[in-house]
Image: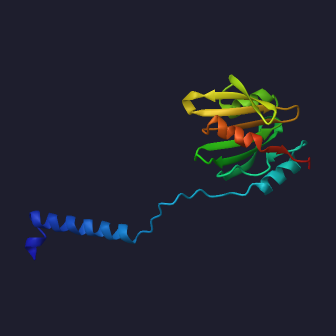
Amino acid sequence: MRRFTEGFYGYAVALLVCLVGAGVFLLVTPQSRDEHIPRVDYSITVANFGHEVPYGVWAPRNDPAGWIPNSNRIAAGTSGAKVLYLGYATAEREHAMFAQSDEKPPAGFASRMANSDKAVGTQQIGGVTWEQRFREDKNQRTLVRMLPDVTLVITGTAGWPELAELAALLQQRPQG
């Protein structure tokens, strides 16, 4: 017995026991190759936000096809303003986020969400003009629409067509 626990044989037996143990572990451990992105319902968050702000809240009338809403929250902005965030995994499995606030100044809010204050162009979506911003080092594209009472921002790593798809689905809900 001592022959199998010392020297080269001992090393070989210990290595074999470890490999067998790792193999058994891999066989009995549940594995999934399916993608799992948790879906989050944001309807209550949007309704609560509508009760907290003095303007009609903007939200998608429905989710774009193949998109998964995966985050939402209401946060404090500057000067007591509230900010609504809705996050998505897009059909291309990129990230997109819709944010809105009546934070002043509106350009400051838009620049903070876009991580840039420089417009690279405009885009017509649903008959309205959105400002485009791009931050290359973060691969971040942003659409900005400044209205008299609220600023709308759609940003993320998604391409321009996907961001425009979300922008086209936005509608203002009645105040309150």
Residue 140 position, x and y percent, is: 61, 34
Q: Measuring 79% from the left and 46% from the top, which residue is drawn there? A: 59
Give the colouring mode of the picture: rainbow
Report the number of numbered marks.
0
Residue 38 position, x and y percent, is: 62, 58
Q: Measuring 60% from the left and 38% from the top, which residue is drawn there? A: 157
Please give left or right for residue 60 compared with residue 141 in the image: right
Q: Quadrant of the N terminus?
A: bottom left
Q: Measuring 75% from the left and 40% from the top, which residue is drawn there? A: 167
The residue closer to the viewer here, 111 or 140, is 140
The residue closer to the viewer here, 6 or 88, is 88
Residue 87 position, x and y percent, is: 68, 47
Q: Is residue 168 above or below residue 107?
A: below
Task: Tell me where residue 14 sits by quadrant.
Answer: bottom left
Please give left or right for residue 148 compared with residue 143 in the image: right
View extreme (left): residue: 3
The residue closer to the viewer here, 13 or 146, is 146
Please give left or right for residue 26 compared with residue 94 in the image: left
Residue 67 position, x and y percent, is: 65, 51
